[in-house]
Image: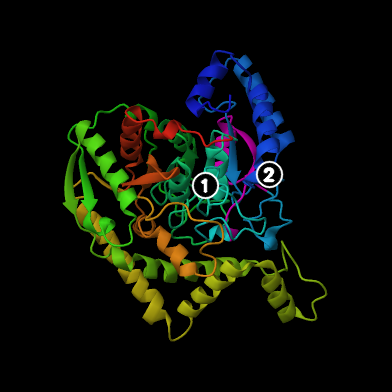
Amino acid sequence: MQQLTLSQIAAGLASKDFSAVELTQHLLARIHALDPQLNSFITVTEELALAQAKAADERRAAGESGALLGAPIAHKDLFCTKGVLTSCGSKILHNFKAPYDATVVEKLAAAGAVSLGKLNMDEFAMGSANESSHFGAVKNPWDLSRVPGGSSGGSAAAVAARLIPAATGTDTGGSIRQPAALTNLTGLKPTYGRVSRWGMIAYASSLDQGGPLARTAEDCALLLGSMAGFDPKDSTCVDQPVDDYLSALAQPLAGLRIGLPKEYFGAGLDSRIADAVLAVVEELKKLGATVKDISLPNMQHAIPAYYVIAPAEASSNLSRFDGVRFGYRCENPVNLEDLYKRSRGEGFGAEVKRRIMVGTYALSAGYYDAYYLKAQKIRRLIKNDFVNAFAEVDLILGPTTPNLAWKLGEKNSDPVSAYLEDIYTITANLAGIPGLSMPAGFVDGLPVGVQLLAPYFQEARLLNVAHQYQQVSDWHTRTPAGF
């Protein structure tokens, strides 16, 4: 049963091949048996999952149907879940049980999805390797000595290892797409404002966006259909009808114009990944697409701009964690200043402290104009590059990551080299456009991902292209050995 996709699970439940309770019990047993070697879960909500599965079976018995009714999933551990530990992978929230459900959690529960638990992540979503978690590093099921990518590494590892068929993640600079690429999954970052951020503990509020991770584009379409939509509780959520993502999957690709940015294929890209990407391009041409060389001239400025803007927003967002209202509190503070300093000093990890310091510096008097304001101007130039490119093409295609999954601990002494792994993904967050990574092959037994970018609210087109490619390829069906 662990090999079933969400759409196959829906068919199996509808035809009564198995019940939601049976499926949930099977996957819980796999989690208990196999997750100790992956460390992908922070919390397994066994009682909740079985109760939700039983309720889903009762709803089906009463005549209700729905693609996600009884489907098992799990949530990245920054989506607030009522009565369940919501830690953001941090010591400072090691004892925080959310008093309410995030909108994404609420919507998926209403659709009948069964939540098996909360997934490991880089602390406060800050990282590209899932090594900064207070609860320990997550391991890549394709090679347990390597990282799964981050910050949604727990989500990616659990889905890739067939512990769950799909999961939620969040993407601030590539944190859905990059781990999807490194673990052979399909991962989608929607347009900024397409999915509510209410109840999603913030890292960088103008960049964060929730989205799905699954094995196929079809499953991502199923999840996104329930996750997306206007939420009056989120002032950045856009009031726009949700497309029928499933019906768009079957559209032919004849006439599709794909742009290949010359900046994607220069120095720094592993030539073997470039070959895999170009092989995908050839397949899409056979399906009717045309290809054009384009330029994104300001892409080179994306990483420095991102690592001013995101830490600046983080320094503001994380100021709420002070040891007073919730979360970790230091022992025997002598005064309020000592409480703040020691609670944060003991509660936050090294990467979070690094980004808070950078962000606070960039926002400080005398440096705001020189750094933060200039980074925002670069952000606008990057957005304009995409506007100009999409006047010529329908989609932009390229590698998701410049390198294969690296060894655990390999980049810990050089955080900048880890930051550079997000070079192709960060621009989509700065511009707010949707992006998708899909499986594109293997190099030395490790997965390679191809990234597709589209204009605002064109998630249906991204899913359509990925689905059509997955009809003529089988990379997405490969399973890591031992799982």
Find residue 308 and report its image quarter. Answer: bottom left
The one of 279 and 62 positioned closer to us in this rendering: 279
Quadrant holding the N terminus: top right
Q: Residue furthest right?
A: 332
Q: CA distance from mark 2 to mark 1?
A: 21 Å
- Using the image, determine if residue 13 lies above or below residue 165: above
Circles 2 and 1: CB atoms closer than 8 Å? no
> Which corner quadrant holds the C terminus?
top right
Q: What amino acid is at disc 2? A: Pro
Q: How is the image coloured?
A: rainbow
Give the class, few, some or many, for how many residues have Cα within 10 Å of label 1's Cα (few <14, many ≥20).
many
Q: In this image, 126 relative to 279: left or right? A: right
Is 214 rendered above or below residue 99?
Answer: above
Q: Nearer the viewer, residue 410 or 283?
A: 410
Q: Amino acid at mark 1?
A: Gly
Residue 221, x across and y down, in percent = 42, 34
Q: Is residue 412 visible?
A: yes
**How many labels were placed on the picture?**
2
Q: Is residue 304 magenta?
A: no
The answer to whether 243 appears left or right of 66 in the picture is left
- The tag earlier along the polypeptide, 2 or 1, is 2
Label ID, residue 36 = 2
The kind of secondary structure element at disc 1 is: strand
- Where residue 184 appears, as percent x and y from the top left, is 45, 41
Vertical position of residue 199 compared to residue 363: above or below: above
Q: Position of residue 239 (x, y in %)?
A: 40, 45
Question: Which type of secondary structure does the marked residue at label 2 adopt?
Answer: helix
Q: Nearer the viewer, mark 2 or mark 1?
A: 2
Magenta residues, start to end: 100-123
Q: Which residue is at 49% across, 68% downward?
A: 415
Residue indicated by mark 1: 169
